[in-house]
Every structure is written in C-alpha cells, then in structure tokens.
Amino acid sequence: MPRPNPSKDLSLKSLELFQTCARDGSLQAAAQEAGLTVSTVSHHLRALEEHLGVELFNHARRPMVLTPKGQTFLRNIEEALLAIRKAKAEASAGSVTEASYLRVGTIEDFDSDIIPELAVFLSASMPTCDFMYQTDSSHEIIDMLRNRQLDIGITTAPDERLSDLRDRPLLRDPFVAVLPRITEQSLSDIFEGRTKLPFLRFSSNLMIARQIESQLRRIGVTSPHRFECSNNQTLMAMAAAGAGWTITTPLLFSRAKQFHARLRMHQFLPGKNFARTLALVSTPDCSRSVIELVDGKMRRLIQDHVLTPFHRSEPWLADSFKLID
C-alpha cells in the first residue's frame, strides 16, 4: 500500500481523471477523452494514490476495478467535482465569441430544418469556435452528456431527475392519436376495444415508447400490435397505408407532411391526454452564455417553423403544444 505523501498537492486534474477511469474502466478511454497520453493519465492516478496513501484501483484487473476504498473515495468526491464544474461554468459565462469548441447533440425531430439553421446561426455568432453535431436518441444523448462527450443536448426530458446535468424545459409536445383517413374506425372505437386495427408502436428501447406505454396503461387502453419501428416517418407511412393506427406528437407529425392528406390526427379526451417535454440539457461546465444563446435561437426557430403554422392549421393544439417559459 502506498504511504501518504502530504508534500504533494491534491490535483483537480487527478481527481477528474480518477473519476473518468472509474467510469470507463480504462486508461486508454480516459486518455482519449481528456486529450492526454496514457502515461500522463497513469502518472496522475499514481500521484493521487501516493497522496492518499491507499490503492484506489485493483491494478491486477482489466478492465480497471475500484478497490473498496476507491469506491468510497469516488462517492465522496463526485458531489464536490459537480460543484466545481458548476462554479467554473458560472465564472466562464463571458462572451460567446471566446468559445473554442462546442459539441451539440439533438434528437432527429429537429434534424430537417431547425438544426441546420441553428448550426448556421451558431457558426456566425461564435467565429472562433469549432463545432461537432450529433443526432441520436434521447437516452444516448443523455448518456453522452453524462460521459462528457457532448456539451449541450436538445432531447426529451426523462422521467427521472437529472441531478448530474442541468436542464431547461423548452417545449410541451402533447401526444396525439393518428389514424388512417381511409378507415371508418374512430378513436372511441379503439379506446373501447371495438376495432381490430393494430397499434403501430415505437421501438420499446426508445424513451418516447416507454412514455406512451406507461400512459396507455394509466388510461386503460390496450390494442393488438404487429409492427414496431424506431422511425417516426415509417410509422406515419404505415398508418397512411391503412396498416394500423399510432401515437405520435405534433412535432413529429409535422415532419411527415407527405402523408398528411391520408391521415387523421386526434386529440385525446380530457383526463386521458398526456405530453412529453423537450428540454435543453447541458453539462455543469457548459458556459451559461452559450446555453442562453442556444436556448434563445431554438425558441425562435421552433416558434417560426412549427408552432405558428401548426396553430394556424390545427387551432385546437394552441393550448397544449407550446413553448415552456
């Protein structure tokens, strides 16, 4: 066991690298994420163990495994590191023109028009900044934020509290039922079990699918299903062809314009309606000025591209499909 070496200062970088290695179980992964060499990461870990006088990892195991003392140490420093990251973000909330690198993740719901306009806007507003854009599912984006692979994400807000990230509610997007226009079945027929029209569902691994299934159980609706898909456009195509009915949201429905003439969108009955919240989620060390810039532009783009035209064509959605102040 190393002996304590109080003459060496406790390095913040060593603590951060220790946390990353504990999460990833790999010196190589931690080095790649931090932009350092493997030997530099190893040096920081050895220095930390020497300072504390304990072994934090079982060095004979691969992938790296924490010792019991390492597990205790990790629990004790995680809140402190989170507080430090928040403090650094507040201190660095200066001009966005000074930002050098920004990694943005978004769900595909905004991919066709809003995100390209956001990218053009941010590029002009942050002239010295390099950008990386990632499109993925909500749970993947949140995982990437937690692993510090993204700085900011636009995603469905999960049901659980994001204690390790910062989130700003952005849009209330209510769920709606979509039926093929060619069918004579009504939403009441489906809810009361008077139809064999199958339910076309989102893939069960998606956050939106779990939200829909939970609410269907709450309101006591069951429906036979024979088709599952992760792509909203495919679900809309199947419904338009008369293959079944589905549940989506106005935002997603707006992206399937080519099928609108063959679909009917229905509001759920009072007491049975439900919605998802889209949010701007960021790491604790993302600059507040950058968050404000992205938040403000996203709100304007959503209002212009989605809400205003939708409220004009579907006025019954005005009270439920809206930006969250």
Image (tube, helix red, strand yellow):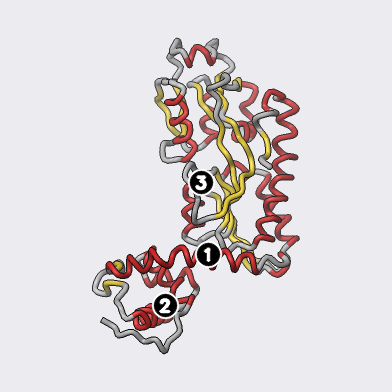
Of the pair 315 and 124, the residue shown nearer to us? 315
Instruction: Please give the name of the residue rendered at 68% of the width and 23% of the height, measured from the top-left corner.
Output: 316
The residue that mark 2 highlights is 41
* Place of residue 70 in the rendered image (x, y in percent of width and height, measured from the top left): 32, 69
- Mark 2 in CB contact with mark 1 (< 8 angstroms): no
The mark that comes first in sequence, 3 or 2, is 2
Quarter of the figure with residue 252: top right
- Residue 138: image tag: 3
* Place of residue 137 in the rendered image (x, y in percent of width and height, measured from the top left): 50, 46
- What type is the residue that disc 3 sits on? Ser
The mark that comes first in sequence, 2 or 1, is 2
Q: Can residue 236 be seen in this view?
A: no
Q: What element carries label 1?
A: helix
Q: Is residue 318 above or below residue 158?
A: above
Of the pair 128 and 274, the residue shown nearer to us? 274
Q: Is mark 3 on a helix, strand or loop?
A: helix
Q: What element carries label 2?
A: helix
The mark that comes first in sequence, 1 or 3, is 1
Give the alpha-carbon distance from disc 3 to disc 2, as whole Å. 31 Å
Give the alpha-carbon distance from disc 2 to disc 1, as whole Å. 23 Å
Instruction: Please give the name of the residue rendered at 41% of the width and 21% of the height, measured from the top-left corner.
Output: 222
Of the pair 138 and 280, the residue shown nearer to us? 280
The residue that mark 1 highlights is 83
- What type is the residue that disc 1 sits on? Ala
Of tags 1 and 3, the one toward the viewer is: 1
**Crowding near the residue tagged with mark 1, few <14, some 14–19, many ≥20 C-alpha atoms within 10 Å:** some
- Position of residue 179 in the picture relative to residue 8 (left or right): right
